[in-house]
Amino acid sequence: MANLIGAVTTSHVPAIGAAIARGRQHDPYWSAFFEGYLPVRRWLDETKPEVVVVVYNDHGLNFFLDKMPTFAIGAAPSYRNADEGWGLPQMPSFQGDEDLSWHLVESLVADEFDIVTCQEMLVDHAFTLPLALLWPQRPWPVRVVPVCVNTVLFPLPSAARCLRLGQSIGRAIDAWDNDARVLVIGSGGLSHQLDGRRAGHINREFDQRFMDSLALEPEWAAQQSINELVRQAGTQGIELLNWLVARGTMTGSVTELYRNYHIPISNTATGLMLFEHRH
Ligand code: DHB
Ligand code: FE
């Protein structure tokens, strides 16, 4: 039986990747943001997860507006990123875990989540940046499984549905016939809006309430409507749906070990949470 050791939720602003590529981590603009990741990196050094399920949203690299699955899972031996126009470096490919991928695909479909299965998949900054923040070494010392949620093209899945997807993934990980240590990452948010009349929208009060809810009562966030979440968090802040999926995977007892909140990076209120999970 696999061991789901916990979850990390984090923002994924592309400028982070440019800062890493140019070695700017200690610049005044960046230092407090990057230092926020050190406690999580220490915890990862101790707990040594072997497989990471990354819940993220694609921003037009692998799925464009002509074909937009609500939920998609990668089932490839490896994945790679590609130029998205942000000037981020292209990396050597990342090692997948086909066994866990297919187990998740079969379990989710049996549990009535009709996901799209991708045997080839490009992964964008929302996938690569959380991994780059958590593991500075290359290659990353983990195998990966991408879980992609549509947070970009309406209609979006409800928050309640996202929490239930997470719970279904969590039960599947628990039942996986492998004793690997598994970590889940939720990528996106917190409040931000990149375009329109509210460009630059940031909502500290809501972000704090949302983080409290993830720690103590995810049902609060899960019962909010998509329109209310967009009103509070912004048209891109709705990426926090990925945090709800990640939180849902932990069906045993959950302890918040750490959080950081830093405003702004680019146009985004950045957040980071670390949860420990035990059965
Ligand atoms: C920004 C934030 C995002 O989540 C994203 O996907 C792209 C850009 C930003 O704040 O610049
Ligand atoms: Fe984004």
Image (spheres, rainbow, N blue to C red):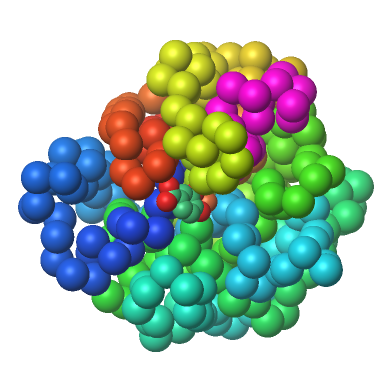
The percent position of residue 156, horizontal first and vertical second, equals 78, 42
Which residues make up the magenta segment? 224-241
Relative depth, front residue between 80 and 67: 67
As displayed, is residue 158 above or below residue 155? Answer: above
Residue at the extreme bottom: 92
Which residue occupies 40% across, 81% down?
Answer: 90
Q: Nearer the viewer, residue 181 or 148?
A: 148
Q: Give the image quarter of residue 131.
A: bottom left
Q: Nearer the viewer, residue 65 or 279?
A: 65
Picture quadrant where residue 252 is located: top right
Q: Does residue 2 belong to the magenta stretch?
A: no
Q: Would you say residue 245 is visible in this rendering? A: yes
Residue 232 picture location, percent across and down: 59, 22
- How many numbered marks does the figure carry? 0
Name the residue rendered at 60%, 41% in the picture: 196
- At a point 73% along the width and 68% down the height, the residue shown is 64
Can residue 136 be seen here? The reply is: no
Asked where in the image residue 230 lies, by quadrant, the reply is top right
Q: Is residue 234 above or below residue 67?
A: above
Determine whether 46 is above or below 222 in the image. Answer: below
> Magenta stretch mostly in which secondary structure?
helix
* Residue furthest to the front: 197
Please state the horizontal and vertical placement of residue 237, each as a whole percent of the image.
55, 37
Residue 66, percent across and down? 83, 68
Left or right of 230 in this view: 275: left
Whether residue 240 is in magenta: the answer is: yes
* Residue at 66% in and 72% down: 62
